[in-house]
Amino acid sequence: MGKKIKLFDPSVGFEEQQVTQQVLKSHFWASGAGIGYVKKFEDSFKKYIDSDDCIAVNSGTAALNLALSLMDLKGKEVIVPSLTFVATINAILLNGGKPVFVDVEPHTMCVDPNQIEKLITKKTKVILPVHYAGMSCSLDKIEQICKKNDLVLIEDAAHAAGAKFMGKRIGSHGIIVCFSFHPVKNLAMPTGGLIAINDSGHRKMRDVLLARRWCGITNRNNFGYDVKEAGWNYYMNEISAAIGLVQLKKLDAMNSIRRQIAKRYSKEINLEGKMPFDENCSYHLYWIMVKNRKRFMEKMFNAGIETGIHYRPVHTMSLYKKNVSLPMTETAGKEIVSIPVHQNLSDTKVDRIIRGINENA
């Protein structure tokens, strides 16, 4: 059978090990008292995506929560896909907003822009699309809808580090774009996230976010500081930032490998329901649609190939149970399967994965 093929597997080399040792030996691991890696990572990622500003945090969940805290969502609605990790929706609820679930497109699993406008009400404040699996949603259409209806575009780009839309990197479009650098992500850290800002008022936003990132602390001067509002403990640590700087340098190369694998999948997997190939996609995930999912995943497991489900639709969960019609989302919730697509897969392993799918699906 051979060695088990992992669904996710970060790239770890000598540079990651070396920089981790440097930070450990410095004895300064937190960003406030650190040796500057968090700021370096913010500046480097800002340059990479060409945004106005970047604020590093300790997770993609923290990024979403902080970003939405800027919106004063109490009593307001946020249009969002149900096919996402629950953290996207939790951030809306925790900031006093109401999620309004929208269906996805069958070929991308991203928000269907044609379904958005019919959901807009007087209470709608934000449209929150998810760049699912690293495939960009239709940002041009969504931006037009936001402009027409005076709504705010906030993007969940947890899967999309290095992805592009119309020649520009994801992170340079919406007013606020949230990234995740969890160990399974394309740019991996022990824990990490980031908020990118594209707005003329980005300096004011940055000041607010920096305070809320660390317990609301402002006007710090040696041992003195003030707190004008409550905040969280969301700052990124120096070890994560140092690893992130190394990962960022090789992100495009790693994403290129993912795209090469996805190209093979799109050509060689004998299924109609599968993720299309797109040169602009970062391919955090590669999904296929399988009728008897449980049996298929068991057969793949027995063949030594890990698979996953991303995700159970949030509107089917107890906290968010909604009697809404989302036909494509509900089909995906029953049939979608994630297969391995990462930079550590050899051609031989990709052959095994394709053969396993074609024999068992």
Image (cartoon, rainbow, N blue to C red):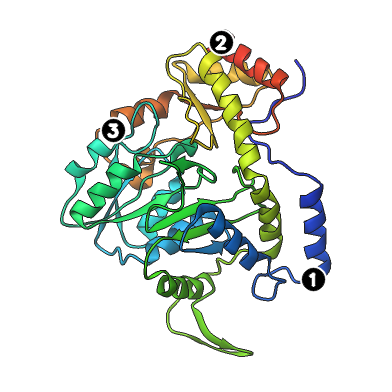
Q: Residue at x 56, y 10 (%)?
A: 358
Query: Helix, strand or loop at disc 2?
Result: helix
Query: Helix, strand or loop at disc 1?
Result: loop
Determine whether, in the image, residue 187 is placed left or right of residue 75.
right
| Mark 2 crowd level (few <14, some 14–19, many ≥20, 10 Å Cα) | few
| Mark 1 crowd level (few <14, some 14–19, many ≥20, 10 Å Cα) | few
- Residue 10 is situated, as x and y percent measured from the top left of the image, at 68, 41
- Residue 215 is situated, as x and y percent measured from the top left of the image, at 52, 75
Vertical side of 172 occupied by 203: above or below: below
Disc 3 marks which amino acid? Leu
Pointer 3: what residue? 326
Pointer 2: what residue? 358
Q: Residue at x 48, y 36 (%)?
A: 280
Question: Can residue 231 be seen here?
Answer: no
Per the rendering, the mark at residue 27 is 1
Disc 1 marks which amino acid? His
Disc 2 marks which amino acid? Asn
- Residue 32 is situated, as x and y percent measured from the top left of the image, at 64, 75
Determine whether, in the image, residue 181 is placed left or right of residue 175.
right
